[in-house]
Image: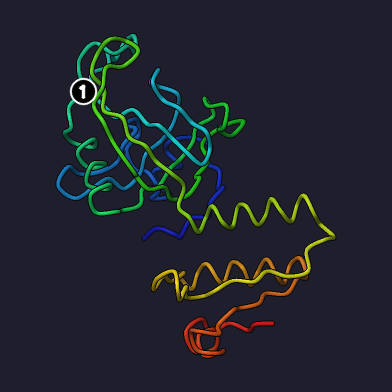
């Protein structure tokens, strides 16, 4: 049984990361099955074609590298973990992302769990080392991205934020819902930093959503 891990949690090495349940393989960058989808990836600077911009990742798949030199010596195929990441895109499945100390955007040491991302596209193209590689475009999960942006705004304007207004269920834009866990994080931030959390429910229940569905106190 694994404990639920928090975004930003640090691990001293791959063994600790594996024991946490976030990413079990001791070396492989992708943890997944080609007929079910991939559960997680680790970014550790192993491939020349990787791009890591924080909220956006261009991730090179697995296979075709020489174990001794680390250089690409064969074409990659959409099999194993690469096929799994294809399924993540087709079925809109999230994948856990961990960054290693080897990256500019990684921790100073060890490994850091950076939350959920979604595969929005993939391709098989010639890489920088002259062989075909499977590449996957990933973006950060929207709720985690929103929380990160709110925290940045609080840090940049510690005394200027009076409140946060949000629609729990989007009405005219479509029947779009947030998860309860997202609102719980908002409630925690509002309490910690003393700003109002306001739910705009004119079209979605006039108060019933926050009390019956979210089971959270509102301002």
Residue 138, how many percent across, how many down?
A: 39, 41
Instruction: Write the residue at 78% across / 69% down.
Output: 162
Q: Which residue is mark 1?
A: 76
Asked which secondary structure carries label 1, the reply is loop
- Report whether 19 appears left or right of 186: left
The image shows residue 75, relative to residue 181, as above or below, that is above
Residue 147, how many percent across, how many down?
A: 59, 57
Question: For residue 137, which quarter of the picture?
Answer: top left
- Report whether 156 appears left or right of 88: right
Q: Quadrant of the C terminus?
A: bottom right
The image shows residue 94, relative to residue 188, as above or below, that is above
Question: For residue 161, which quarter of the picture?
Answer: bottom right
Residue 188, how many percent across, how many down?
A: 65, 69
Q: Quadrant of the N terminus?
A: bottom left
The image shows residue 105, relative to residue 210, as above or below, that is above
Residue 182, how many percent across, how many down?
A: 52, 67
Residue sitting at the far right: 159
Name the residue nearer the viewer: 214 or 15.
Answer: 214
Instruction: Write the residue at 25% across / 43% down.
Output: 32
Which colouring convention does the figure follow? rainbow
Name the residue nearer the viewer: 65 or 61.
Answer: 61
Name the residue nearer the viewer: 159 or 14.
Answer: 159
Instruction: Write the residue at 76% across / 65% down.
Output: 193
- Report whether 16 appears left or right of 162: left
């Amino acid at each position: 049984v694994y404990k639920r891990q928090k975004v930003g949690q640090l691990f001293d090495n791959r063994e600790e990361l594996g024991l946490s349940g976030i990413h079990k393989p001791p070396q492989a960058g992708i943890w997944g099955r080609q007929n079910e989808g991939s559960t997680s990836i680790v970014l550790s600077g192993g491939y020349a074609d990787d791009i890591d911009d924080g909220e956006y990742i261009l991730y090179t798949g697995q296979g075709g590298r020489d174990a001794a030199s680390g250089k690409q010596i064969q074409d990659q195929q959409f099999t194993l973990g690469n096929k799994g990441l294809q399924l993540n895109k087709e079925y809109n499945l999230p994948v856990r992302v961990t960054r290693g100390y080897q990256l500019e955007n990684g921790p100073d040491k060890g490994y850091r769990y950076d939350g959920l991302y979604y595969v929005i596209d993939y391709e098989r193209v010639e890489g920088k080392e002259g062989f075909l590689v499977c590449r996957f475009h990933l973006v950060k999960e929207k709720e985690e991205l929103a929380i990160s942006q709110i925290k940045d705004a609080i840090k940049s304007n510690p005394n200027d934020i009076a409140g946060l207004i949000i629609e729990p269920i989007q009405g005219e834009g479509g029947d779009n819902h947030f998860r309860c866990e997202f609102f719980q994080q908002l409630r925690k931030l509002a309490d910690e930093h003393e700003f109002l959390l306001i739910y705009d429910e004119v079209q979605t229940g006039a108060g019933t959503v926050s009390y019956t569905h979210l089971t959270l106190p509102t301002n």
